[in-house]
Amino acid sequence: MIPVNQTITNFRNGNCIQACVASIFELELNEVPNFMEYGIDRFDMIIIEFCNRFGLYPMDLEIKDNEKGKNILKGLYSIGIGLSPRGNLEDQHHGVVCYEGKIIHDPFENMVGLYNNKILIHTLFIVKDPSLWKF
């Protein structure tokens, strides 16, 4: 994981998810689409298409903060999605990079994380064909 910061910080087409994906995939920001530019209706399709190029599938999981949840995330990077501490706290979400369920990088310039550091959803990147995965 190489930290990449977001360059667009508004809630309409902010690129925190683009920066999180670039960080986890160790890519330059311009090598990853700003998924929000396509609108929320096409967001899922665009991120799936992007991940498909790497043989991966983005899977969203709501993981409880307990021992079982911690085991699911063991050794994995994910994008943690939660409420932004900079918005109205009802529908303005933000993404951060997590490792084993803990926030390790906030792509926002002042790195304040998520409201109450509460992750609502983890986006994991799952190998589509495990037979192609090299250890």
Image (cartoon, helix red, strand yellow):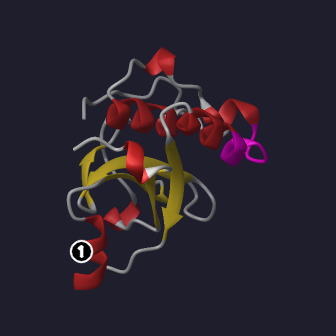
Give the position of the N terminus as an image quadrant: top left
Rendered position, 84 above or below 34: below
Q: Which residue is mark 1?
A: 71
The amino acid on which the numbered mark 1 sits, given as a three-letter code, is Asn
In the rendered structure, the answer to whether residue 1 lies left or right of residue 120 reads left
Q: Position of residue 99 (x, y in %)?
A: 24, 53
The residue positioned 47% from the left and 73% from the top of the image is 62
In the rendered structure, the answer to whether residue 95 lies left or right of residue 50 reads left
Q: Quadrant of residue 93?
A: bottom right
Q: Position of residue 7 (x, y in %)?
A: 47, 23
Q: Position of residue 100 (x, y in %)?
A: 23, 60
Rendered position, 43 above or below 15: below
Residue furthest toward the front?
Answer: 131
Residues shaded magenta: 39-45
Q: Confirm whether residue 9 shows in the render.
A: yes
Give the position of the C terminus as an image quadrant: top left
Rendered position, 8 above or below 119: above
The residue positioned 32% from the left and 63% from the top of the image is 117
How dense is the environment of label 1, judged by Cα within 10 Å: few (below 14), some, or many (20 and up)?
few
* Helix, strand or loop under label 1: helix
